[in-house]
Image (spheres, helix red, strand yellow):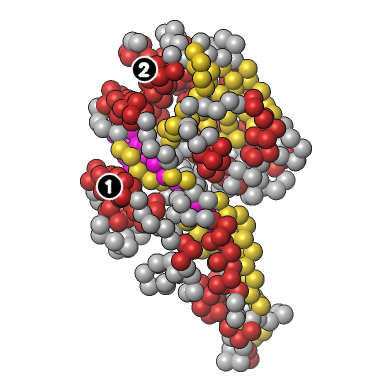
């Protein structure tokens, strides 16, 4: 295989075709169903899937079948089936739904208007995860351009990942045996520690979300009349959260939220910490003077990939400060997001959290916790020697540096589904969400040059995979 020709094909495709389609995709506010319950009526998801499908049909992939699969009341599924010359199957995965807008975008930037600045494409969804279908098909087409024989390649792009992949099981059931057991899965929805080498994700945390409501009155009352008589819902809320999280250290307190850290994952975290050093914490947009929870980069990596954490991500019942009167509020509702360790049983953890929050409420307050979803994480099976060598070789050839293996703090529900369904499958999970790329937040960007090189790495791994099934 001619590496220069491969890189040239990929670079030309990105520059002449992919970037313009990605810009058009950024302009579509196709928010995931949890953030846009009327997604079907608004039509944005349909526009996004049609945009991608049209591009896929134009690619130089003879015999490829591009299908938009639909089920009543479910988000669509984009399926591209590329016949192969060899036995076996490789499955490539991504998603096209997006997180909501969020606030704090820099001047000149915004979620729905694409801007290329300093080699980065800004806008919601380009990096998480709109680029995946373009990168996947280009990686395959670059090999076909050199007549590299491949097994069948199936590209699956869902539209509900940011809502916990709620619609995906129904689509998989409807597909039945249409997707055979893949010997390799490539997922492009993960993080990278820097933009200098391949980062391979070896585990994913689970996610438990829910709303916690505390109600003490039927209506707000003048604070001069009510405080000292009625407890404030905010103070009760603090006490309840302290049942599951140490408010000083941030440690989670329930046994059901803890697992034993495997020795190999600790060793990988140590190696990654040596590569990243201070940038483990430095990648975050810190306010002036704020420090990380630890000075040890390895501990920070373990904290964010193999330990449970809690974040309050939203609140109802608190008026904006500009319009907040002297009133004891009747109730407060907060949305909490718990990241659970990869091997933690998320439904069991959800039950434990609910029991801890709702039992014996202070002052007899009305307390209700409503879980909004519980996705168990995933720990990758051991790498086959060929795959570990292939990823390392690709990183050296394309970037000139070793690949790094590391856990991911986020959740990709499909990986757990696949791992359970196909226990003998090998996984190459990687992505472009590096320092300051800020998926889900303001100023999300796609590092264009890194994405081009990562596409080439996917080509090389697919070529090595072909040799194992030939």
Q: Is residue 202 above or below residue 385?
A: below
Residue 192 picture quarter: top left
Q: Is residue 423 magenta?
A: no
Q: Which residues are magenta?
A: 192-209
For the residue pair 46 and 140, the one nearer the viewer reads as 140
The x, y position of residue 303, in whole percent, is 36, 57
Question: Quadrant where the C terminus lies?
Answer: top left
Residue 231 visible to an observer of this rendering: yes
- Apparent side of residue 108 relative to residue 371 in the rendered image (left or right): left
- Apparent side of residue 375 relative to residue 7 in the rendered image (left or right): right
- Apparent side of residue 242 relative to residue 96 in the rendered image (left or right): left
Q: Is residue 144 above or below residue 449?
A: above
Which of marks 2 and 1 precedes in the sequence? 2
Q: Is residue 133 above or below residue 468?
A: below
Query: Residue at (59%, 47%) from the top-left corner?
Result: 164
Question: Quadrant where the N terminus lies?
Answer: top left
What is the tally of numbered marks visible in this picture? 2
The x, y position of residue 342, in whole percent, is 45, 50
The x, y position of residue 246, in whole percent, is 42, 72
For the residue pair 226 and 307, the one nearer the viewer reads as 307
For the residue pair 120 and 269, the one nearer the viewer reads as 269
Residue under numbered circle 1: 267
Q: Residues within 10 Å of mark 2 (few under 14, many from 20)?
A: many
Q: Is residue 208 above or below residue 72?
A: below
Query: Residue at (71%, 36%) from the top-left corner?
Result: 43
Residue 170 picture quarter: top right
The x, y position of residue 270, in whole percent, is 26, 48
Q: Residues within 10 Å of mark 1 (few under 14, many from 20)?
A: some
Disc 1 versus disc 2: distance between alpha carbons? 33 Å
**What's the mark number on residue 7?**
2
Residue 220 picture quarter: bottom right
């Amino acid at each position: 295989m001619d590496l220069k020709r491969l890189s040239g094909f990929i670079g030309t495709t990105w520059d002449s075709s992919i970037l313009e389609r990605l810009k058009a995709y950024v302009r579509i506010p196709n928010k995931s169903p949890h953030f846009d319950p009327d997604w079907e009526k608004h039509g944005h998801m349909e526009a996004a899937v049609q945009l991608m499908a049209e591009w896929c049909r134009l690619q130089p992939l003879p015999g490829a079948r591009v299908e938009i699969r639909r089920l009543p009341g479910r988000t669509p599924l984009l399926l591209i089936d590329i016949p192969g010359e060899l036995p076996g199957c490789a499955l490539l995965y991504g998603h096209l739904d997006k997180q909501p807008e969020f606030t704090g975008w820099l001047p000149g930037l915004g979620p729905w208007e694409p801007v290329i600045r300093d080699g980065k494409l800004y806008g919601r969804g380009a990096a998480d995860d709109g680029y995946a279908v373009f990168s996947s098909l280009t990686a395959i087409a670059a090999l076909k351009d050199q007549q590299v024989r491949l097994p069948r390649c199936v590209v699956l792009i869902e539209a509900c990942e940011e809502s916990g992949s709620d619609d995906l099981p129904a689509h998989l059931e409807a597909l039945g045996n249409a997707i055979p057991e893949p010997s390799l899965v490539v997922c492009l929805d993960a993080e990278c520690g820097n933009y200098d080498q391949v980062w391979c994700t070896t585990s994913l945390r689970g996610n438990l979300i829910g709303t916690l409501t505390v109600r003490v009155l039927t209506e707000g009352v003048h604070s001069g009349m009510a405080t000292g008589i009625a407890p404030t819902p905010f103070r009760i809320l603090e006490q309840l959260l302290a049942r599951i999280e140490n408010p000083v250290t941030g440690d989670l307190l329930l046994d059901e939220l803890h697992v034993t850290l495997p020795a190999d994952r600790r060793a990988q975290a140590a190696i990654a910490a040596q590569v990243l050093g201070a940038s483990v914490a430095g990648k975050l947009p810190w306010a002036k003077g704020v420090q990380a929870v630890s000075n040890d980069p390895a501990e920070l990596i373990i904290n964010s990939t193999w330990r449970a954490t809690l974040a309050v991500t939203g609140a109802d019942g608190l008026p904006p400060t500009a319009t907040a009167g002297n009133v004891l509020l009747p109730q407060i509702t907060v949305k909490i997001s718990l990241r659970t360790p990869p091997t933690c049983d998320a439904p069991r953890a959800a039950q434990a959290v609910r029991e801890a929050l709702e039992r014996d409420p202070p002052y007899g307050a009305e307390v209700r916790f409503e879980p909004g979803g519980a996705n168990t994480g995933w720990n990758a099976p051991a790498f086959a020697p060929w795959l570990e060598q292939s990823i390392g070789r690709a990183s050296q050839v394309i970037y000139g540096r070793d690949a790094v293996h590391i856990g991911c703090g986020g959740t990709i529900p499909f990986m757990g589904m696949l791992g359970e369904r196909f226990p003998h499958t090998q996984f190459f999970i990687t992505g472009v969400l590096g320092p300051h790329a800020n998926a889900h937040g303001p100023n999300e960007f796609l590092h264009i040059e890194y994405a081009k090189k990562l596409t080439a790495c996917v080509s090389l791994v697919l070529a090595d995979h072909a040799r194992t099934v030939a």
